[in-house]
Image (tube, rainbow, N blue to C red):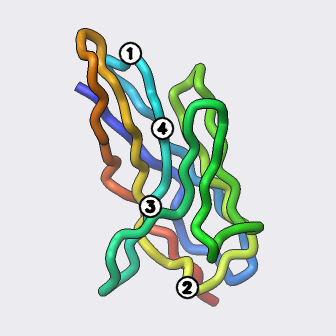
């Protein structure tokens, strides 16, 4: 079994910062990619940022220059540093990881339960 547990969400004023964390645990052979998605009310889930082997990163255009994704391989943890937050960033943020378990040749996607980020004055 594999679990992803997010933390760090909350209420912040516009222009403020938050740091999200997501730790993967369980029978993990390798983690090929980790990322953050978000879903705002009445909208579809969208990719925010993603980091793959070699620390290659991808960002949604609307967060470039404001958000930074990073990863601690020793801790199986991914972070999302969010600066200059805007009300439009309000959403539930979900951690995603593509993980290969011990005893398996193929990886699959896992999701956390989500953490709410609210940007409001």
Secondary element type, mark 3: strand
Secondary element type, mark 1: strand
Find disc 1 in the rendering and name its residue.
Answer: 29
Secondary element type, mark 4: strand
**Few, some or many residues within 10 Å of mark 1 (<14, 14–19, 20+):** some
Query: Where is residue 37, by image quadrant?
Result: bottom left
Quarter of the rendering occupied by the N terminus: top left
The mark closer to the camera, 4 or 2, is 4
Q: Of the numbered discs in the image, which one, if any, rests on residue 33?
A: 4
Find disc 2 in the rendering and name its residue.
Answer: 88
Find disc 3 in the rendering and name its residue.
Answer: 37
Q: Nearer the viewer, residue 6 or 98?
A: 98
| Percent position of residue 61, x then y | 63, 73
**Few, some or many residues within 10 Å of mark 2 (<14, 14–19, 20+):** few
Marks 2/1: CA distance? 37 Å
Image point (31%, 53%), residue name: 113
Relative to 41, is 6 above or below? above
Q: Is residue 51 left or right of residue 17?
A: left
Image point (32%, 47%), residue name: 111
- Among the two numbered marks 4 and 2 on one chain, the one whose residue lies closer to the N terminus: 4
Marks 4/1: CA distance? 13 Å
Marks 4 and 2 in Cβ contact (< 8 Å) = no
Quarter of the rendering occupied by the C terminus: bottom right
Marks 1/3: CA distance? 23 Å
The mark closer to the camera, 4 or 3, is 4
Q: Is residue 12 left or right of residue 29?
A: right
Number of numbered labels in the structure image:
4
The mark closer to the camera, 2 or 1, is 1
Marks 4 and 1 in Cβ contact (< 8 Å) = no
């Amino acid at each position: 079994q594999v679990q992803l547990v997010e933390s760090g969400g909350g209420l912040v004023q516009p222009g403020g910062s938050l740091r999200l964390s997501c730790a993967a645990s369980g029978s993990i052979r390798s983690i090929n990619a980790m990322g953050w998605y978000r879903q705002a009310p009445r909208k579809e889930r969208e990719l925010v940022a993603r980091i793959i082997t070699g620390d290659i990163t991808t960002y949604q255009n609307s967060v470039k220059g404001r958000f930074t994704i990073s990863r601690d391989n020793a801790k199986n943890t991914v972070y999302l540093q969010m600066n200059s937050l805007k009300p439009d960033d309000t959403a539930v943020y979900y951690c995603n990881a593509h993980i290969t378990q011990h005893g398996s040749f193929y990886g699959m996607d896992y999701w956390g339960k989500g953490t709410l980020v609210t940007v409001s004055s």
